[in-house]
Image (spheres, rainbow, N blue to C red):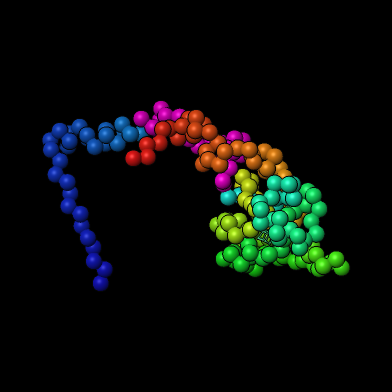
């Protein structure tokens, strides 16, 4: 049997009953917010740039002389030209992913004994955008960018490939690599949008 729980009606005094004081208090909040600057934007006409550490569409960093020290070791076994994806086909990203089947990574061994990546695909339809793959990459190749518009009319277009990932990685680094790794682009902009945050 379903039990119905009744809440006790509040005992209102005469003033509250006659002048609808609670109603007026509610309206006060409405009017206060009516005069505040809005924090929403008119998307898609206005677009915010997300923070640098935003987890958007994936990209590959290329071999550009700024690789982490681990690349000096792993890269020795790879045939990677300058300005090409610095992926060393270690499969660590795939291992770390809760949905490993979304990756398709292939590499071949060349006659000189080195390895070359021939395929790196990700089906973003299955992606949770959790970022575990990025953390697992030992050579800082796989990154997530500030690009959040990834909707497509065709499922096949949701599969990203190594070439477009490298292009996206070059573009992201050109625009934002020098930027400080902070949550907001700049504190003034954040304060303007959201007001001053009190952390305590
Ligand atoms: S963001 Fe998460 S779900 Fe998406 S590919 Fe990386 S690890 Fe997998
Ligand atoms: S973890 Fe990095 S280097 Fe290894 S396969 Fe994935 S993207 Fe390539």
Whether residue 160 is visible: no
Region in magenta: 31-54
- State the image quarter where residue 177 is shown: top right
In the rendered image, the vertical position of residue 53 relative to residue 24, given as above or below:
below
Q: Position of residue 9 (x, y in %)?
A: 17, 49
Prevalent SS, magenta region: loop
In the rendered image, the vertical position of residue 32 relative to residue 126, given as above or below:
above
For the point 13% across and 38% down, which residue is it?
Answer: 13
For the point 59% across and 35% down, which residue is it?
Answer: 46
Task: Look at the image and say whether residue 166 sits in the magenta stretch.
Answer: no
Decide if residue 75 is on the left or right side of residue 32.
right
Q: Position of residue 34 (x, y in %)?
A: 40, 30
How many numbered marks does the figure carry?
0
Tell which residue pokes out farthest to the top in this image. 35
Quarter of the picture holding the C terminus: top left
In the rendered image, the vertical position of residue 84 relative to residue 172, given as above or below:
below
Task: Return the residue nearer the eye: 182 or 63.
Answer: 63
- State the image quarter where residue 153 is shown: bottom right
Q: Position of residue 173 (x, y in %)?
A: 68, 43
Q: Position of residue 178 (x, y in %)?
A: 63, 38
Task: Return the residue nearer the eye: 166 or 179.
Answer: 179
Whether residue 111 is visible: yes
């Amino acid at each position: 049997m379903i039990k119905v729980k009744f809440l006790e009606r509040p005992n209102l005094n005469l003033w509250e009953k006659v002048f609808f004081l609670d109603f007026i208090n509610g309206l006060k909040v409405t009017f206060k917010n009516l005069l505040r600057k809005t924090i929403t934007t008119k998307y898609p006409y206005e677009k915010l740039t997300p923070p640098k550490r935003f987890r958007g569409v994936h990209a590959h960093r290329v071999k550009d002389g700024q690789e982490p020290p681990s690349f000096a070791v792993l890269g020795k076994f790879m045939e990677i030209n300058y300005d090409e994806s610095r992926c060393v086909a270690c499969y660590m990203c795939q291992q770390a992913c809760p949905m490993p089947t979304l990756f398709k990574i292939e590499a071949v061994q060349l006659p000189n004994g080195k390895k070359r990546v021939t395929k790196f695909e990700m089906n973003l339809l299955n992606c949770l955008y959790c970022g575990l793959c990025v953390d697992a990459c030992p050579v800082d190749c796989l990154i997530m960018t500030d690009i959040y518009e990834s909707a497509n009319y065709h499922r096949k277009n949701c599969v990203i490939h190594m070439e477009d990932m490298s292009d996206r990685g070059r573009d992201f680094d050109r625009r934002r690599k020098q930027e400080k790794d902070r949550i907001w682009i700049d504190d003034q902009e954040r304060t303007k949008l959201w007001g001053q945050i009190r952390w305590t």
